[in-house]
Amino acid sequence: MFQRVHYISIGSALISCMLSPIATALEAHVHGEAVLNIATDQGDVEAVLRSPMANIVGFEYEAKSAEDKATQEKALKLLKNANNILKLSASANCLTEHVEVVWDEEHGDHDHEEHEGHDHHEEHADHEEHDHEGHADITATYHFKCSNPEALTDMTLSLFDSFKGVEKLHVNLITDKGAQQLELTPSSKGFKF
């Protein structure tokens, strides 16, 4: 029972992160950018990564060719190994307890009826192909249990090394010290708690 209540409190903290202005801004589905929401509580660390699929695999359409399916499988394998995404302080002895990766479609193929009365296809010539692809996001959730939480002092993001399409990462962090928002890039990919 305690563990369930504990997860609920971390979940509540993550919901707060997701409602932040940065997280809300990412809902616009900006290629090259992703959001990482992190909450820590008594040795538990929950991290939720949300990114446009294009940042991770290079496309947002349904994988049909053998090459696209292989690319997607490789990305899924990388995402399912938490060490490919983030590294917590080694001395905190954090073990991955749970990983969940969801490929979700924000909106699929557009119906051209949505655009009747608009003449913006000429205005956005490159958008037509984009309309047919739709938008897809990837959400990866990582839960860690740290046996030495007092030593949890920093995190380094391996995400940039694994997925070159991620150019900027907005981090929303909630710890017992309070909340903070950070912006990480491939040249600045770590932070202190």
Image (spheres, helix red, strand yellow):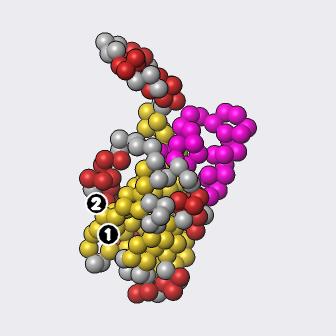
Pick the residue in front: 97 or 152. 152
Question: Which image quadrant: the N terminus?
Answer: bottom left
158 over 115 or under it: above or below = below
Pick the residue in front: 76 or 147. 76
Residue 24 as seen in the image, left or right of residue 192: left
Q: x and y percent of residue 114 in the render? A: 36, 19
Residue 172 as seen in the image, left or right of residue 135: left
Amino acid on which the number 1 mark rests in the picture = Ile
As drawn, the residue found furthest toward the front would be 187
Residue 167 as seen in the image, left or right of residue 181: right
Instruction: Residue under label 1, please give it.
Output: 174
Query: Mark 1 or mark 2, which is nearer the start of the sequence?
Result: 2
Q: Residue at x 59, y 64 (%)?
A: 84
Q: x and y percent of residue 75 in the render? A: 62, 52
Instruction: Residue under label 2, please give it.
Output: 16
Q: Main secondary structure of the magenta part?
A: helix
Residue 98 as seen in the image, left or right of residue 38: right
Q: Residue at x 44, y 26 (%)?
A: 127
Q: Residue at x 62, y 58 (%)?
A: 78
Disc 2 to disc 1, how far (Cα)? 9 Å
Stretch of the chain drawn in magenta = 50-78
Q: Secondary structure at mark 1?
A: strand
Q: Secondary structure at mark 2?
A: helix
Question: Which image quadrant: the C terminus?
Answer: bottom left
172 over 107 or under it: above or below = below
- Numbered label tally: 2
- Marks 1 and 2: in contact by CB < 8 Å? yes
